[in-house]
Image (spheres, rainbow, N blue to C red):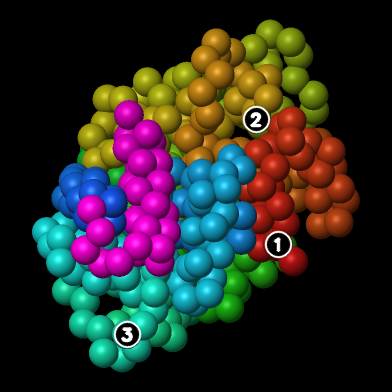
Amino acid sequence: MTRDALFLVVSDLALAIQGASTYPENHPRVQELLAHLHRRVQSEAERLRGLNIGFFSDHIVVDEFPFLEPNPTFTRLIERMREKGIEKILFSGGITFGELKRFVYFLGEGTTPPSEQVWESIVYGRIEGAEASGAVSLGLAPAFSPSVFMAGAEEVLRDVLVSMVTERKRSGVEEGRDIVSSIMKGLRQEGMLIDRLIRLQAHDDYTVTHSLNVCILVVAQAARFGLSENRVREAGLAAMLHDIGKETTPSDILTKPGRLEMDQFDLMKRHPTAGAKLLRRIDCGTELPMIVAFEHHIKYDRSGYPKVRTREPLHIASYMTQIADVYDALRSYRPYRPSIELERTLSIMKEGRGTEFEPRLFDGFVDILS
């Protein structure tokens, strides 16, 4: 129902803008479209504590939901936003009908210069910095030196994972969020964290280092995809905890320097379900870690594990985590093989585009690395 409601918000926005550019301001058709739009925007903005809409070259993201399917109405809306130099809009709760009407006519007609507009409940602009008056930067937090963060992150994360498994404490979740916030800041330093991952691969304490690497890569994907800062943080936390179920897997299987036997692999395949069950008993403030823990080995074509019958799309954070998980696994040194160089890793992964990996997210991931 949530996805359907957000779809209707964007549809109503597109129709209202089209109406504003076609009919006189007091035409009954325009008033009807604006009334529909105002009810939906006000309701969703209050429910979500702020309604984020991101516009990209061929898709729209509302809150955490991407709309990737071809849609002529959305295509025209994206083109309109491109003309205005708008990549993201944030509607706050309590938005009035009058302000929303002015904004729609600004988008539909553009007769009033942006410098003369004052918005109380609307922020718009470019994701990495705004150009229009009344717009603000909607990117992540200010720059932060990644070396300061990385020095102790692995040790902290190790303690977080252990405490969550053994003590079921929410305090571990909050420490995890702090790590993600630092990652979000570090990624603003010209992608230095990504650069470090490409050049240096972990040789020990694999699960902890791998979880940290996957978190960094998912935060980068989520930010690029235009998710709100809070959604980026939640996706990062979920990615960091995606392998927490491995804490219940026998250590001799995790560290075996060779291919697993069939019965050993069957035990290994239980970690997504084990992780989801564990996280269900912990108050993470969001269900997303539980969802991603369960889904991160289910492939885009529904192969993989655990087996699921539904054909509903996975959560976008699960798709992102799966891509980052496979990439870091191939790039990292393991006792039974050396790390695989970057070009070969991407060549291997490209074979799974559209079957193992969600294709558009995979393309965006490749863009990040390049």
Q: Residue at x 71, y 28 (%)?
A: 256
Rendered location of residue 209, percent (x, y): 57, 50
The quarter in which the N terminus is drawn is top left
Taking the view exactly as shown, the residue that stands out farthest to the bottom is: 115
Q: Nearer the viewer, mark 3 or mark 2?
A: 3
* Residue 257: % across, % down: 76, 31
Which residue is disc 3 drawn over? 112
Q: Residue at x 71, y 32 (%)?
A: 356
Q: Is residue 262 magenta?
A: no
User: Which residue is drawn at the image coordinates 32% and 37% (left, top)?
Assistant: 5
Label 3–label 2 contact, CB within 8 A: no
Query: How many residues crowd around disc 1 within 10 Å: few (fewer than 14), some, or many (20 or more)?
Result: few
| Separation of marks 3 and 1 at Cα, in angstroms | 37 Å
Give the Cα distance between marks 1 and 2.
Answer: 20 Å
Q: Is residue 172 visible?
A: no
Image quarter of residue 217:
bottom right
Secondary structure found at label 3: loop
Magenta-colored span:
1-28
Circle 1 sits in a helix, a strand or a loop, which is it?
A: helix
Pick the front one: 155 or 191: 191
* 131 sits left or right of 311 in the view: left
Q: Which residue is mark 2?
A: 300
Please name the amino acid that badge 1 sits on: Asp
Q: Is residue 267 left or right of residue 144?
A: right
Q: Amino acid at mark 2?
A: Tyr
Q: Is residue 80 above or below residue 144?
A: above
Q: Which residue is mark 1?
A: 367
Q: Is residue 11 magenta?
A: yes
Question: Does any portion of residue 193 appear in the rendered image?
Answer: yes
In the picture, measured across the screen, residue 325 lies left or right of residue 13, that is right
